[in-house]
Image (cartoon, rainbow, N blue to C red):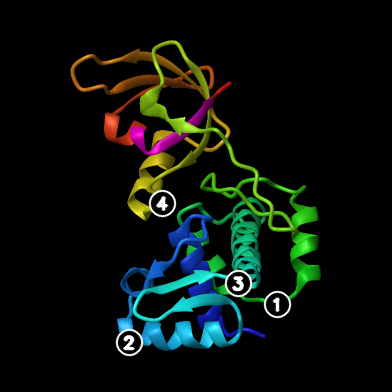
Amino acid sequence: MNSFTEENYLKAIYTLTEQSNSVVSTNAIAEKMNTKAASVTDMLKKLSDKKLINYQKYQGGALSSKGKKVALSIIRKHRLWEMFLLEKLDFKWDEVHDVAEQLEHINSDKLIAQIDKFLNYPKFDPHGEPIPDANGKIQQQRSKSMANYKKNDVLLMTGVVDHSTSFLNYIDKSGLALGNEIRIKDVNEFDRSLQITIGKKNTIFISNDVAKNILAIIK
């Protein structure tokens, strides 16, 4: 069994490689984990001994097939817990991440399978990130930044790029949420700000910076 810290490292390496098999530098991992490079080197050696990564001295490491499987399992648990907290326990979407960080280390395949079933097998978490299935397969959405769409487009909000508490609070106060139907009523030629209608009635203005951080697909 892997320790919580080992699992966190595997998840961090996976995130840094974005599903590729490229080598991640020690410094990049140290920055991601908010720790010293020497500590990272020690951990990479431990993970290498467990055959979870392919370690290259002075360069860093890349996930092995075994390590990638563990990383995807942790990510799956994290994102399912986020959905459970949001949908069933009335957590706000800016609150679920920190709690899920703790719950993701519970080692029970049956529990996660039951949560997945209870939630009706969601494909995406509250932030629009894909949830790996039990086999580690991920369904990608062809979402684009809302800033890339044009006047009169009718969209479905699928996620956000910025996961910070301040941005998520802003989105909540604006009345935006995943699954919203959004119509772009106008695009300001000067600053590319948008006038949008959420659902049938609620019309608001959002800046170009906000639009860049909202993901959507054509409905």
Reading the image, the residue beneath label 3 is 67
Label 1 crowding class (10 Å Cα cut-off): few <14, some 14-19, many 20+?
few
In front of the other: 201 or 42: 42
Circles 4 and 2, Cβ within 8 Å, touching? The answer is no
Q: Which residue is pictured at 40% across the width and 74% down the height?
A: 60
Q: What kind of element bears circle 1?
A: loop
Q: Which residue is pictured at 57% across the width and 88% down the height?
A: 49
Nearer the N terminus, badge 4 or badge 1? 1
Label 2 crowding class (10 Å Cα cut-off): few <14, some 14-19, many 20+?
few
Q: Is residue 20 above or below residue 61?
A: above
Reading the image, the residue beneath label 1 is 107
Q: Amino acid at mark 2?
A: Ala
Label 3 crowding class (10 Å Cα cut-off): few <14, some 14-19, many 20+?
many
Q: Can you say which quadrant of the picture contains the N terminus?
A: bottom right
Circles 1 and 2, Cβ within 8 Å, touching? The answer is no
Q: Amino acid at mark 3?
A: Gly
**Nearer the viewer's eye, disc 1 or disc 3?**
3
Q: Which residue is pictured at 59% across the width and 50% down the height?
A: 125
Please check the rendered image and state whether residue 192 is part of the magenta-colored stretch, yes or no: no
Reading the image, the residue beneath label 2 is 38
Distance between the Cα atoms at labels 1 and 3? 16 Å
Distance between the Cα atoms at labels 3 and 2? 21 Å
Nearer the N terminus, badge 1 or badge 3? 3
Q: Main secondary structure of the magenta part?
A: strand
Q: Which residue is pictured at 81% across the width and 69% down the height?
A: 110
Q: Specify the segment rendered in magenta.
A: 212-217
Residue 163, numbered label: 4
Q: What kind of element bears circle 3?
A: helix
